[in-house]
Image: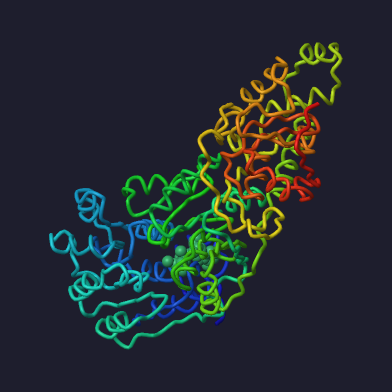
């Protein structure tokens, strides 16, 4: 099919002006084919991919056909969801901007009848509504159908899925028989075919073929991720790729709620959309998201259906969609109208078969990618921090603290030591996000690929519940919770060390032994890292790890005696933070 210029489509000057103002340069394939058909007066069945411009394909001819002098409904558009109705109404409003005396009105559940009634009374000619609410108005006699000359069903198959088929049938039966009827539907299941048969006359089918089903500009990749590691991997990908705007799809409302909490706790800004969110709230969330008021919109399929948001960098399929069609609907949110975008899909275990099915359906290639290691993410964060620091220095836009620095210099500290100490006090210098403290693996949280592990019979052993006495009593032994600022804790650790009290090299806790690791503060190691590598690689419960003391070039770690041999065996010689790890039992000096 050929794309046309809007100027080739016999449109009025007002519409050409509106289209140009919206920044559309040429008509999309579905627009090029559908607009002449609808203007010509024929009934039509249109099929094309998400994001291909179907709204304007029907809205442009619909506006052209409205008689501005008649103040009564002339075009009725049925949409599956309230969001979609609002979006279509917005697009109609933009397209009709230069047409005098044409008004559109969205009507949907959740908004007051009163307000919609006033809009109808005011003489709106293009009504965009959900089938249920349109039926309500028809029954109340507040919506007049006698002047209706065109009925458009947008996303008819979705309306079927949502159980609107009876309402649609009733609405269509009440519209004047000589009206024009337009169906848009991604697929045509039997009940839709039946509706088309009953309610159209010799419809022209306009189908834009499946070769363009997924927009080629969308880069599609997948990661094999264990369910319990999804949050961690998601955050790594976001950080590594500097993603600041994305939609994340989850399978259930509960998953949506949970993930939003996780993201916020890790310092990302996120909000959600699902079936339990009130209409007023949804509108606020959407408006805020469009204005980039937060980074990540976490949503279920139904809630996000048909959403029109521009410039989404990435769509995450945090949970796999049900089928190829949902997949296409989801990823159609990115790479809209020719812009490039990315779709990242998580696949857990046997779901890989489902993904293969989706690939066949979409006739596209979804590339497998390796989960980035914590080190790669760390490296990236450090680079970002380095860049920020360098920029601040070069711009010279900071308050000076010469007295303080001079005092420290006089006390014999080197400039590099002072700077390093400051970065340390800043807490998580690796993180570009305030409040986020980087990966904190739990015993099971690390997928196999994160850290090198040798396989042995121990691998299969589930982490054991810690015995009561092996719980570390000391407060600085536990990995710190994410949101807690690092500073007081680090300071507490140091002052204790400086107080010089307990001998350093043997553990004084019952049942614990003390090990030395050959990495310390100079290698940028933090207590959480140590807990992570021990718990993750040796697969011992983190409660079995006691006090951790960081020194410049080594660290001392208490672990429950029973795990000593395993930890020594598993950790010795592995790569950690770019160094080869060496672990020994501490000798009493
Ligand atoms: P669909 O209903 O097929 O999923 P939409 O009608 O929602 O697609 O359009 C997707 C996006 O493309 C919208 O942001 C819309 O403004 C934009 N768009 C539509 N037609 C054009 C065009 N001819 N040129 C550029 N952008 C367009
Ligand atoms: Mg649409």
Q: Nearer the viewer, residue 517 or 150?
A: 517
Q: Nearer the viewer, residue 563 or 223?
A: 563
Q: Nearer the viewer, residue 300 or 174?
A: 300
Does 502 sit above or below residue 433?
Answer: above
Which quarter of the figure is the N terminus placed in?
bottom right
Using the rendered image of the protein, determine whether residue 295 is visible from the camera's viewpoint.
yes
Which quarter of the figure is the C terminus placed in?
top right
Q: Residue furthest left?
A: 140
Tell me the residue at 58%/53% (across/down): 234
Using the rendered image of the protein, determine whether residue 16 is visible from the camera's viewpoint.
no
Tell me the residue at 64%/39% (across/down): 561
Residue 427 placed where, x, y %?
66, 30
Q: Quadrant of ligand 2?
A: bottom left
Residue 489 position by quadrant: top right
Residue 58 placed where, x, y %?
40, 70
Mark count:
0
In the rendered structure, the answer to whether residue 467 lies left or right of residue 149 reads right
In the rendered structure, the answer to whether residue 96 lies left or right of residue 75 reads right
Residue 324 placed where, x, y %?
48, 73
In the rendered structure, the answer to whether residue 60 lies left or right of residue 218 reads left
In the rendered structure, the answer to whether residue 507 lies left or right of residue 309 reads right
Does 71 sit above or below residue 159?
Answer: above
Q: Residue furthest bottom?
A: 202
Tell me the residue at 46%/71% (across/down): 11
Residue 183 placed where, x, y %?
35, 76
Tell me the residue at 59%/28% (across/down): 485
Display colour scheme: rainbow
């Amino acid at each position: 099919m050929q794309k046309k210029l809007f100027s080739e489509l016999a449109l009025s000057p007002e519409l050409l002006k509106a289209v140009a103002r919206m920044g559309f340069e040429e008509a999309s394939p579905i627009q090029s084919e559908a607009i002449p058909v609808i203007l010509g007066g024929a009934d039509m069945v249109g099929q094309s991919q998400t994001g291909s411009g179907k709204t304007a394909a029907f809205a442009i001819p619909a506006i052209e056909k409205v008689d501005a002098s008649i103040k009564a409904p002339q075009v009725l558009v049925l949409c599956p969801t309230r969001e979609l109705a609002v979006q279509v109404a917005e697009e109609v409003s933009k397209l009709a901007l230069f047409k005098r005396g044409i008004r559109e009105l969205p009507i949907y559940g959740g908004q007051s009848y009163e307000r919609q009634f006033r809009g109808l009374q005011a003489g709106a000619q293009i009504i965009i509504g959900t089938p249920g609410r349109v039926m309500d108005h028809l029954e109340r006699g507040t919506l007049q159908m006698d002047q209706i000359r065109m009925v458009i069903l947008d996303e008819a198959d979705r309306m079927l899925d949502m159980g609107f088929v009876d309402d649609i049938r009733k609405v269509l039966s009440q519209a004047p028989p000589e009206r024009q009827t337009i169906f848009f539907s991604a697929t045509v299941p039997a009940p839709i075919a039946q509706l088309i048969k009953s309610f159209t006359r010799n419809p022209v089918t306009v189908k834009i073929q499946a070769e363009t089903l997924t927009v080629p500009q969308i880069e599609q990749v997948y990661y094999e991720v264990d369910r319990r590691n999804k949050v961690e991997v998601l955050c790594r990908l976001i950080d590594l790729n500097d993603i600041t705007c994305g939609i994340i799809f989850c399978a259930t409302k509960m998953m949506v709620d949970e993930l939003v909490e996780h993201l916020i706790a890790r310092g990302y800004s996120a909000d959600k959309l699902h079936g339990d969110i009130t209409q007023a709230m949804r509108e606020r969330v959407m408006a805020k998201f469009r204005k980039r008021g937060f980074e990540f919109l976490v949503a279920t399929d139904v809630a996000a259906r048909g959403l029109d948001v521009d410039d989404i960098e990435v769509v995450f399929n945090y949970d796999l969609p049900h089928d190829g069609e949902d997949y296409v609907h989801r990823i159609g949110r990115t790479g809209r109208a020719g812009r490039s975008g990315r779709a990242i899909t998580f696949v857990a275990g046997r779901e890989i078969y489902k993904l293969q099915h989706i690939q066949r359906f979409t006739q596209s290639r979804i590339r497998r990618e390796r989960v980035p290691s914590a080190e790669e993410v760390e490296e990236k964060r450090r680079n970002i921090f380095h860049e920020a620091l360098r920029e601040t220095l070069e711009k010279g836009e900071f308050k000076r603290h010469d007295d303080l620095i001079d005092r420290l210099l006089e006390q014999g500290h080197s400039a590099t030591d002072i700077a390093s100490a400051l970065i340390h006090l800043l807490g998580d210098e690796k993180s570009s996000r305030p409040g986020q403290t980087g990966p904190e693996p739990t015993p099971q949280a690390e997928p196999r690929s994160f850290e090198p592990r040798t396989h042995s019979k121990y691998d299969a052993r589930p982490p054991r519940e810690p015995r009561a006495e092996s719980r570390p009593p000391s407060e600085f032994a536990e990995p710190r919770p994410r949101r807690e600022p690092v500073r007081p804790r680090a300071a507490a650790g140091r002052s204790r060390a400086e107080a010089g009290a307990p001998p350093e090299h043997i553990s004084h806790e019952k049942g614990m032994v003390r090990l030395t690791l050959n990495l310390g503060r100079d290698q940028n190691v933090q207590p959480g890292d140590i807990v992570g590598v021990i718990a993750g690689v040796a697969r011992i419960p983190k409660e079995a790890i006691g006090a951790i003391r960081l020194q410049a070039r080594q660290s001392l770690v208490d672990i429950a005696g029973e795990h000593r041999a395993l930890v020594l065996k598993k950790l010795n010689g592995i790569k950690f933070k770019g160094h080869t790890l060496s672990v020994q039992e501490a000798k009493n000096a």
